[in-house]
Image: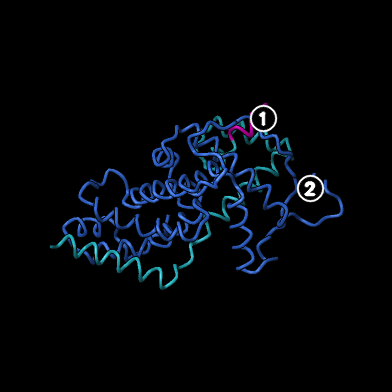
Amino acid sequence: MPQEAAAFDETALVTQARQGDSEAFNGLAERYQRNIFRLAQNITQNREDAEDVLQETFLKAYEHLPEFHGDSKFYTWIVRIAVNEALMKLRKRKWDKTVWLDEPINTGEDSVAREIAVWEDNPEQRYSKEELHDILDKAVNGLAPPYRTVFVLRDMEGLSTEETAEALELSVPAVKSRLLRARLQLRDKLTAFFKKKVEDPFAYL
Amino acid sequence: MLTCKQFMAELSDYLDEALGREERKKLEEHINACPNCWVIADTTRKTVEFYKCSQPVPIPTDLRTRLMKALERKMASKRV
């Protein structure tokens, strides 16, 4: 979730926007646009689609604002709109051969052998800010959509397990299972970059 | 003592501090005795932290302009 700035009062802005204050709604759009765009890019993996999702999300949010009664946070509400828009884009792409979110997936033991190696103390220091951004980005984009979407909502956008389950129309156990798989797969991918360079691979024992 | 498989099944809740005291204690006993699970838990925690700390970059100016203009049009049409 976007970090809270002292001057930002979401509830007050939402109240004003609901009363017809367009500046207040613009303030909300300014606040959340970069998170929504990142989320859209991560789910669709397509720049053009992500741009459409960004625009559609805020237009729909404005249109349906009278239906928002504050049962959830406004941010969670617009994330749900964005997720729906992004998944629609993903499904429309006929060339996309990846598994869909509502397909059953094997949540059993991860058959991929895990590399077990300690990381350096501050592995990020080995890379520039841009390189690190690129590594994290590529790793998350390498996840299959069912895992990627859950991971993006839970660990990047800060939604709770229950909010993620609601946004994706999944059960709480399904969210937990996919999140674990996503986290472990990412850990494996990042280990290749961040592991400690040691002569003895069992030095940590 | 938990098996590695039982530990892995609870790893996410352990990292999210979503477990009760008793459960947590069992997991801690396991990682204190199992170096492999300790490494997996430690590096998975760091993985999650990397992503939690990563802030989205500002969106390109032209995209932001298009978004605000589209909203402006929408707002104007609602006022009529």
Q: Amino acid at mark 2?
A: Tyr
Does residue A136 lie above or below A30 as drawn?
above
Single out the residue that lies furthest toward the left: B80
Tell me if residue A57 comes above or below residue B6 in the rendering.
below
Who is closer to the viewer here, A28 or A119?
A28
Label 1 residue SS:
helix
Q: Pointer 1: what residue?
A: B5
Residue at 71% in and 38% down: A112
From the image, give the main secondary structure of the stretch colored magenta: helix
Q: Residue A66 or B76: which is nearer the viewer?
A: B76
SS state under label 2:
loop
In the rendered structure, the answer to whether residue A117 lies left or right of residue A17 reads: right
Rendering colour (chain B)? cyan
Residue A179 x/y as whole percent: 54, 41
Q: Residue at x 40, y 42 (%)?
A: A167
**x%, y% of residue A28?**
31, 61
| Residue under the point 71% across and 53% down | A119
For this view, does A59 lie left or right of residue B63?
left
- Chain ID of residue with mark 1: B
Q: Pick out the residue farthest to the front.
A: A94
Colour mode? by chain
Based on the picture, tell me whether residue B74 belongs to the magenta stretch: no
Query: Do tag 2 and tag 1 residues touch (Cβ < 8 Å)?
Result: no
The tint chain A carries is blue
Residue B41: % across, % down: 65, 43
Three-letter amino acid code at disc 1? Lys
Query: Viewer-nearest of labels 2 and 1?
Result: 1
| Residue hosting label 2 | A204
Q: Give the residues in magenta.
A: B1-10
Residue A136 locus on image (x, y percent) = 60, 57
Residue A32: give its label. none
If the image is split into quadrants, where does the N terminus of chain A sit?
bottom left
